[in-house]
Image (cartoon, coloured by chain):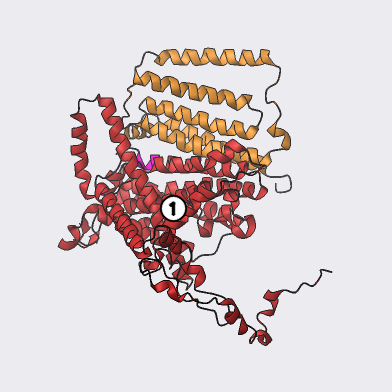
Amino acid sequence: MTAKKPDPEDKKPEPAAAPAPVPVPAAAAPAPAPAAKAAPPKYVPPTPVLNRGNGRLIEDRFTTWPTQVFADRWSRPGYQWGAGMLAGILLGFAVTSALIGELAGWGDKLYSLLGAQGLPPLAVEAIWVAIKVILVMHVILINGLWSIWWERKISAHIQTRVGPTYAGSPKGWNFHGWAQTAIDGIKLFLKEDVTPAAADKWVHALAPAIVVVPCIIAFAPVLFGDGLAAASLDIGTLYIFAFAGISVIGIVMAGWGSGNKYSLLGGLRGAAQMVSYELPRGFSVVPVLMFAGSLDLQVIANAQAGYWQGIIPRWFIFYPVVGQLAFTIFLIASVAETNRTPFDIPEAESELVSGFHTEYSGMKWSIFFLAEYAYVLLGSFLLATFFLGGGASPINAVPFTLVPSWLWMLGKAMLMMFVFLWIRWTLPRFRVDQLMDYCWKFLLPWSFVNIAFAGLYLAFWLK
Amino acid sequence: MLEQIVFYSLSLLTLASALAVVLHRNTVHSSLFLGLSLAGVAGLFAALGADFIFAAQIMVYVSGVAVLVMFVVMLLGRASDLHLRQINERWMAALLVCGVAAVGLFKIARLHSATVATGAPRPSTHDIGRLFLGEWLVPFELISLVLLAALLGAVFFTRTENAR
């Protein structure tokens, strides 16, 4: 017996209300300021465009925020800022990729220069490690800017939308909303950091750090090209898997520390899922390790050099049956490890609000996503290294083999990242029991069978 | 000098967090400190230059065992787990157990206490693999048999009477 309130929203779709909006625009539209032409640098708001259906302003909400704020605050046309920011981002991309790519040879010079300063060797090592850590951290941060924007565009086009379009500048330099992630990042910095009253303060605050720190550490031995790794570790593969697994603790801490039953359920689901999927993920790489005979990522990449009959590259994905099976299992398990959509039961929106990060806001919330996208990048680079030949060219012909190895590596990793995003926006979510059955009764047995196949290959074919 | 700083700080971390595991009243905090303590042990392995065991310790204990302990504590936890004291008054028995364990550990540790560990990490994976599948093959397989038996036992005991 609720009181019937007059609801204007209910009446809108009725055909009888169709003539009603006609007087509304006349009343709502303010007199457009004609004197605004006098000062060219000042931002001139466009004439309001009204929706014919309901008479509301449609142009207004896109042109007043946030780009007009930019234009007004610094009294400079938005496109100049847009061009400047785009140039800055491109310069950042170029400098970063050059530093980790072509200019890596300068690293040795820098190292010897550091050694020539008369510093104690320990200080030289410390400065050198700090430089490498800063470079790798920038890979993670720039990856966040890039891949979130890319994911939004890809998801939009998969769902026949267009995605971010307006962010950037009101006057043109808004190439597919390129500034969307940067502006979202500014928004996240300015948001309030809420800690629920029921939360365990320390656990709640430490959880994002426990998620993101192992992720940064795990990037140390990742191969960005031939000989381009921050740390050349003999146990590289094991090291990456070990540190990538620690992030589960952060997810469990976030789930429990929020003091919220949905978060707790999400955290528990996350723990069960990630501990389970670590097994097929690790075992699917064992054939690759057997073929290469090492855990070192550089040795694994070098083991795939060369071409069969001078045409087909000797990548592990092209090893019949074993390669494809290992690749598929590793890809599926990597998607599951990043909690992305076919496997996103820890954060299932329709059941658990947002799962373990329901009670997070602002930068703490965004750190979870920074870690998620960093793990996507990590999985992409690992797929490229383990199965796609690392920095080797796919075509054994001159213009392709001359392309630097870090460019091939980046291209393969970006291709794999596209596959990650594609999977996420194509497949629906698993149920919890289906998810566990899929891991323990399908992926894990087949990864064992795959190891046996690889043993047969080693016994009869490769030696 | 640097090795000693690293060793003593890691030992302090390991022991302090191990003490926090038993002294904390909140079992969830205890399980988190357990993970920290196990990570400290991994750090000690790294300080000894044992790279493979360092990564295996992190992979198996920190991101496996500690996570499962947290999982169980959170899934089966009662409200009393969050504030009840976890230690009882039986300090005599505890002292006895600790004494026996300490003497045993001392006797084992004395055998190797003269060995100087190399601080720098040295690739040890190939050597470990050769030893496991060569000289120590039988003990290695026996340990895996023990683990298999434990697995089957866990499955057997968790099945209910009806399912049997």
User: Principal SS element in the magenta part?
Assistant: loop
Q: Is residue A179 magenta-colored?
A: no
Q: Quadrant of residue A201?
A: top right
Numbered disc total: 1
Which residue range is magenta in the image? A224-240
Judging depth in this view, the residue of B153 and B53 nearest the camera is B53
Q: Position of residue A59 (x, y in %)?
A: 49, 73
Does any portion of residue A395 appear in the rendered image? yes
Judging depth in this view, the residue of B104 and A389 nearest the camera is A389
Q: Is residue A228 magenta-colored?
A: yes
Judging depth in this view, the residue of A353 and B64 nearest the camera is A353
Measured along the vertical axis of the image, is residue A427 above or below residue B92?
below
- In the visual, does A53 lie left or right of B139? right
Residue in view at x 43 percent, y 74 percent: A35
Q: Position of residue B33 (x, y in %)?
A: 56, 30
Give the chain letter at badge 1. A
- The hue of chain A in the figure is red
Q: Amino acid at mark 1?
A: Tyr
- The hue of chain B in the figure is orange
Identify the element where label 1 is drawn: helix
Residue in view at x 36 percent, y 35 percent: B129
Assign the N terminus of chain A to one quadrant of the image.
bottom right
Measured along the vertical axis of the image, is residue B138 above or below residue A321?
above
Measured along the vertical axis of the image, is residue A331 above or below residue B44?
below
- In the visual, does A401 lie left or right of B45? left
Q: Position of residue A249 (x, y in %)?
A: 53, 40
